Amino acid sequence: MQTRTLGDSGVEVSEVGFGAWVIGTDWWGDRSEEQAVEMVQHAIDRGITYFDTGDVYGHGRSEELLGRALAEHRDEVTLSTKVGYDFYNNPQAGHGELPKRLDPEWLRTAVERSLDRLGVDHVEFLQIHNANVAEVTDDLVAELEAMREEGLVDALGWALGPSIGWLAEGDRAVELDFDAVQTVFNVFEQVPGRHFLDTIEEEDADTSLVARVPHSSGLLNEQVRPDTELGEGDHRGHRPDEWYETGWEKLETLRFLERDGERTMGQAAIQWLLGHDAVAAVTPTFRTADDIDEWAAAPSTPALSDEEMARVEELYRTNFGVDRDDGMDALRSSVGGDDLAGTGMQSAGD
C-alpha cells in the first residue's frame, strides 16, 4: 500500500482508506461490535492506514468502535473524523439529515467529545461535515486554525454532501487552502470531482481530494444489479431503480478495464481515481473481509494507461452510450440543478 499526502499538511493517508460509516450504523448492513472491530483490524493487516469516521455515524458509536479497534495501532494510522451535526439534542429520523451546528464554540465542544470517544488526544485530519458555504464563517475558520495550532488536529478538510450543497462549498475550501475536500467521485459520477480537479489546477492549489462512493453505490464493484433486492434500511436504496438499470448498461462498456483478469472492475474503479494526482485517497464502502482483500490490493494492480483513461473520458462524454434518464437529477444538487446550470455543467457530464 502506498501513501499520499493531504495538501501540504504533511499528513499521509493510505491510497485506499477505510470509511468507518459502515460500523456503528446499520446503513450498510448489520454487524456485531466484534465483527466491526475485526473488520478494522483486518484492514490494518491489508495495509490500510487511513481511517475516516464522523461523530454523527451511529451518534458517536462509530468513533467508539474505531477507537477501540485502533487502540493498539495508534502510531501506525492516520485518523480522521467529521463534526458539524447536533445529534446530541435531536433524534435520528431514518436517513434524514439532522440539524447542523457550526458555531465556533459548538465546534470545539464537538471535537473534544469526538476525541474522548476515540480515546485519543488529537486526530490527524478533521473535516467539517456537509457544511453549506454560508455556515463557514471567518470565526469558524479561525477556530479551526486555532485547534490546529494547539495540536488537536494536523490537517483540515471539508466533507461535501451529494445533495446538500457542493459547488460553492468545494470552491470555498480550495480558496481557504483547506488540505482536502471529500466528495462523491467515481467513473459514473464525475461531477463534482472533475470540477474540483480543474479548480485545484487553475488556482495552483495544494488541496487534495478524498474520493468516496468510488463504486457508485455497488454498480462498479458489481454487487448491485437491477434485480438486486436491497435490505430494509440499506443506504443504497435511496437511489432510484433507473440508476441501477442504466448503470448496468454503462458498466458493460467498461469491460476493457478488467484487462484479461489482471484487475477486477472494482479495482479498476479505484485505479481510475488514483490516476488523478490530486486524489489523495479513495474510501470504498467495505462490507466484508473479501471486500477489504480485493480493494486494498487495487493499488498493486496495473495502473490505467493513458489510452484507458482517454477511453473512459470519451465514454463519459457520451454518457456511455445510454440515452435514458437515470433518475438522479433531483439528488445531484441542493438547489434543483441551478448551481450546475450556472456553470454550464450538465448532470451526466461536462
Image: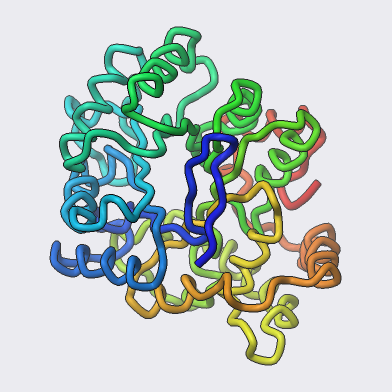
Q: Position of residue 65 (x, y in %)?
A: 18, 53
Any part of residue 321 in sight:
no
* Vertical relation: 164 (above or below) 40: above
The front one of 36 and 121 is 121
Q: In this view, does 116 lie to the left or right of 339?
A: left
**Residue at horizontal 58 percent and vertical 70 percent from the top:** 299
Instruction: Inspect this view and state whether residue 152 appears.
Output: yes
131, above or below 95, in the image: above
**Residue 248, located in which quarter of the rendered image?**
bottom right
User: Which residue is located at x 83 percent, y 67 percent?
Assistant: 306
Question: Residue 242 appears in which quarter of the rendering?
Answer: bottom right
Tell me if 173 is positioned left or right of 119 in this view: right
For the residue pair 115 and 331, the one nearer the viewer reads as 115
Expressed as whole percent of the image width and height from the top left, the position of residue 318 reads: 84, 61
Q: Residue 206 appears at what percent x and percent y? A: 66, 34
Vertical relation: 5 (above or below) 326? above
- Quadrant hosting residue 186: bottom right
